[in-house]
Image (spheres, rainbow, N blue to C red):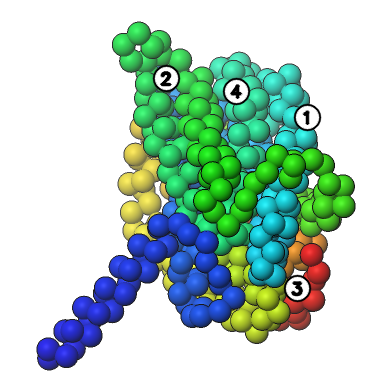
Amino acid sequence: MLEQKTASLGKLSQIFTLIKQALKGEDLDFTQGSIRKAVILLAIPMMLEMAMESVFALVDLYFVGHLHNSSHAIQTVGLTESVLTVIYSLAIGMSMAATAVVARRIGEKDPVAASKAGMQAIIIAVAFNLIISIAGLIYATDILLLMGASAETAAQGTTFMRIMMGGSIIIVLLFLINGIFRGAGNAAIAMKSLWIANIANIILCPVLINGFGPIPAFGLTGAAMATSIGRGIGVCYQVYHLVSGKSLLKIKLSYFRPHFEQIKALLKIATPGIFQFVIASCSWIFLAQLVATTGGDHGSAGYQTALRLMMFFMLPAWGMSNAAATLVGQNLGAKHIDRAEQSVMKTAKYVVIYMLFVMVLTFGVGRYFISFFSNDVLIQEVAKNALQIMSLGYIFYGIGMVLISTFNGAGDTWTPTWVNLFGFWLFQIPLGYFLAKYLEMGPTGVFIAIPVAETGIAIAGYILFKIGKWKTIKV
């Protein structure tokens, strides 16, 4: 009995030590040792990082959801987030390329080349984002109207959209620099930057939205101000760690001089990666517009509420799946192909367990989460229906995310791009349109199309994973 108790305490101590190591933040070699330990060390900070990313939208949603005539404010936040997914696509596409190349160079034990690649990725991302930001500033109202917002909602939300689009360079840098750190195996810095950004956002949101002392109440506009400032503080934290010289990545000013061969190599990986997420993002934008036109302001607000909650639960799984990208990249660089494949299967196992838990939680207490974000009964009813239907595919969402991360981590960004093209544009969108319009199911038809398409994407990803083309990609 004493021996069993001692053994249990020993295991508990090991778990706490592992968690502490994961949160501490240090450069680790994931090409050797326990795969299970490697997955946990990467997954814990990555899950917390992505959970923090989803908190931005939820914090905004909570505070604007309690404003007067909240359906317009909620719709503006949701539709703006849908448009910002195009920015996220650029950021994620570039961060995937940075993660893949940095991880491969780290696996080859060449940190200087890894550092140079990371800085070239930043140059590319900033150049592209400037064009998108300017367009967002000029055409903010038109974009909201195009997304299906009513004239009143578009008028109220124009300033919010302009601030979010104008400050989108901060979003790009936040994602990209975190991708660089993840590729180097230091996921804790990425996590901490999101913590800092969110703490700032949580403090600033009520102050700027409702006013405090001499600070006036900016209402909906205050939410955009708080989010942009919070993310900006997070980027400052990242930059500090890049230039401090304490990490494996050593940054020099000369690394920011354009190196066209390196830029070409990064774009070769990033371009399909960007298309990959633009395809998915445009699908979500179309679905949001379809819900707005068939369900009105309350239908749109309910869908956006459910979507934000769903993403809150799914982003930690995405963070966990990012562990597969780092492990695959580093192990392919070290020529440990079998270890790379084993890492994927181990990560997928943990993601499935997490998503199963989330699915049960959603069905059990999802309605309570919804009521926390809106007092409007009509919005709550739509959100509850959406959340329950969309959550049926949680396990397949998780498997699909791990497989997509595997291809991207290997530098095989074309495979998931084609999977997304067929899965979203040639299946999900037509199915959603058919159910919503022709069968006159309205928003419910859109909700059904989402888990059906995601299940198909997961099955296609698994077949392509077993074929194994990703093992032969050179970056």
Cβ–Cβ below 8 Å for labels 2 and 3?
no
Q: Amino acid type of disc 3?
A: Trp
| Residue at image coords 79%, 76% | 472
Tag shown at residue 163: 4
Alpha-carbon neighbours of circle 2 within 10 Å: few (<14), some, or many (≥20)?
Answer: many
| Residue at image coords 49%, 80% | 34
Residue tagged by mark 2?
A: 208
Tag shown at residue 131: 1
Q: Estimate the spatial distance between the alpha carbons at disc 4 and disc 3, rounded to whole Å.
A: 40 Å
Q: Amino acid type of disc 2?
A: Leu
Q: Amino acid type of disc 4?
A: Ile
Q: Estimate the spatial distance between the alpha carbons at disc 2 and disc 1, rounded to whole Å.
A: 28 Å
For numbered disc 3, what is the local secondary structure?
A: helix
Cβ–Cβ below 8 Å for labels 1 and 4?
no
Q: Earlier in the sequence, mark 4 or mark 2?
A: 4
Q: Earlier in the sequence, mark 2 or mark 3?
A: 2
Q: Residue furthest left?
A: 2
The quadrant holding residue 5 is: bottom left
Q: Position of residue 288 (x, y in %)?
A: 63, 40
Q: Position of residue 412 (x, y in %)?
A: 77, 66
Q: Nearer the viewer, residue 125 or 154?
A: 125
Q: Earlier in the sequence, mark 2 or mark 1?
A: 1
Residue tagged by mark 3?
A: 470
| Image: 450 above or below 212 | below
Left or right: where does residue 466 sit relative to residue 185?
right
For numbered disc 4, what is the local secondary structure?
A: helix
Residue 207 visible to an observer of this rendering = yes
Q: Amino acid type of disc 1?
A: Ile
| Image: 248 above or below 36 | above
Cβ–Cβ below 8 Å for labels 4 and 3?
no
| Image: 369 above or below 46 | above
| Residue at image coords 74%, 30% | 130
